[in-house]
Amino acid sequence: MNLPTAPSAGPLPLVCAARRGARASLLAVLVVLPACRGLRPTPVPSSVAPAPAVVAGVASAARVTPPPADPATPEEVVRTAIAVFGDSTAATVADSSGEEPVWDIDVRSYETHDRVEHYVELFSNKARERFQSRLSRGTRYEPMIRAKLRASGMPEDLTYLALIESGYDPHAYSRAAAVGMWQFMSSTARDVGMRVDWWMDERRDPARATDGAIRFLGFLQKQFGSFYLAAAAYNGGPGRVSRGLTRFADELEGAEGEDRFFALAEQDFLRAETKNYVPQLIAAALVAKKPDQYGLRIDSLPTYAYDSLRVAAGTSLAALAAAGNLPGSTLRDLNPALLRGITPPDADIWLRVPVGMSESLRAAIDTVPPEALRGFRAVRLDEAMSASGFASRHGVSLKQLRWFNPTWRISRKGRLTAGQTLRVPQEAALSFARDIPDPSLEKFGGPSGTKGLSARGVHVVRRGETLGAIARRYGLTESQLKAMNGLRGSRILAGQTLQIRKSTVSERSGKNVTSSKAKSQKSRVKKPVEKPAPAKKKATSKPRKAASSKVKKKK
């Protein structure tokens, strides 16, 4: 009798599994026998709690590609294994080598889409080396990202958004001043709970940035009801996606679930980058889970893991490394959010340390005087002097002095004012400092950009603004503003763009514009009135001469 197998599995995977032990043999019998009889395996008792990661992934795959009626499906294999053995065996069976990978985002429905096929070809041929390198880097962070996604109930394969955004680079920096593995703007990062200031930029911290990305994606998924629309909004802004769904509601009629993104992408509305964002995500998931099939060789890196240790404000990473006899690069790599080589001088924080070393490092630093652990010394200025002169006197560069004193006071003459206290960095601490742009930079939605967008009827949400306040600013009701932007809720995020009524902008600014224009026009009118005589003489003298010359010619 030919035993039917799941269409995605390799030849007789359960028979092979049976040879590995008695438990696997029993599992094979449980699954194969019902399949032979054309029956379904015994359903899972309600008291058994399946592992979220395994069940979520398999259940999603079952929705994407419904299995044949008779053969046992991978989902049924996992459910039966969980019912008999518990979660661990099910996870082992689901991840057995040789089986078709399982995705928990809808990949199968779109793998033949033109743009998806284009990026699969790109990732596996022309851009193979770069894609391969980024996947290898991702092996360090992917276990942590997947664990956090799993704990939040989000699809684990959203990890590939970090691959598309930055190639899993914690220090990625875009032209628009987006930073980190998940490419956050500073205002949006603060809104989702990250610290971003002169001393610390948690956008560069893989764990904290992942937490923020999960919060943001969760909000977007609730707003749009689709992970692919949420991904598009993550890339192009929720305001643009909302307006697109509203403007093309008739064209999108009948499209449901993830199809809504592809229906919207067919319209001439989203930016090209956003249209290609989801196809890149799908293509990345296809290639990354089957690297051998596409000729990729992925090198595995040590997993990003750490313990935590509470340390005092202003503690030097170099001093900690010396106290614990640790390589300096270890602490620096585990704490990429620390920008100046020290912990923020205004607060105690939890520092990342190698796994298993929190207690020994605590014992070591408790024997070191606090002033020896501090990464700077305080110097009071008794008289005004130039910043360059002060830096030279204390053996540091002007840039290094500025790193540790972002709020120093400078007089109109460009000199450091007397009476203030400056931090002079220790030489060892400087070796851990990063020379990076000011994290407070926010190119998107800055003063000039906001002014230009407002003139075109678009408002960029700034930190602390509410939907009601924005509506009142432009003479709208909150319900009108929500309807114009296709918003169902009242929550908005910094950096989000909202469509506003263009006439409202001119009406509100009309008085000021009119008065300024009137003043300028009056000043222009006054100029020729002040000196009318020379202009009139020049204008009248020439015609008179011309007239007289004409008369002479006639004579």
Image: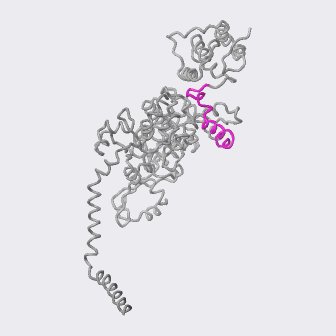
Looking at the figure, which quarter contains the C terminus? bottom left
> Is residue 341 left or right of 102 when viewed as pictured?
left
How many numbered markers are drawn? 0
Q: Answer whether residue 167 is magenta in the image.
A: no
Q: Quadrant of residue 292?
A: top right
The residue at 36%/64% (across/down) is 384
Depth check, front residue: 355 or 540: 540
Q: Is residue 106 above or below residue 477?
A: above
Q: Quadrant of residue 422?
A: bottom left
> Is residue 105 left or right of 513 when viewed as pictured?
right
Task: Give x and y (percent) for residue 47.
Answer: 50, 10
Q: Which residues are magenta?
A: 102-131
Q: Answer whether residue 113 is magenta in the image.
A: yes
| Residue lying farthest to the top in this orientation | 37
Q: Is residue 325 visible?
A: no
Q: Is residue 131 visible?
A: yes
Depth check, front residue: 281 or 535: 535
Task: Give x and y (percent) for residue 535.
Answer: 30, 80
Looking at the figure, which quarter contains the N terminus? top right
What kind of secondary structure does the magenta stretch mostly adopt? Answer: helix
> Is residue 124 left or right of 171 when viewed as pictured?
right
> Is residue 4 left or right of 543 when viewed as pictured?
right
| Residue lying farthest to the right in this orientation | 1
Task: Give x and y (percent) for residue 281.
Answer: 57, 35
Task: Give x and y (percent) for residue 351.
Answer: 48, 38
Q: Quadrant of residue 240?
A: top left
Depth check, front residue: 17 or 392: 17
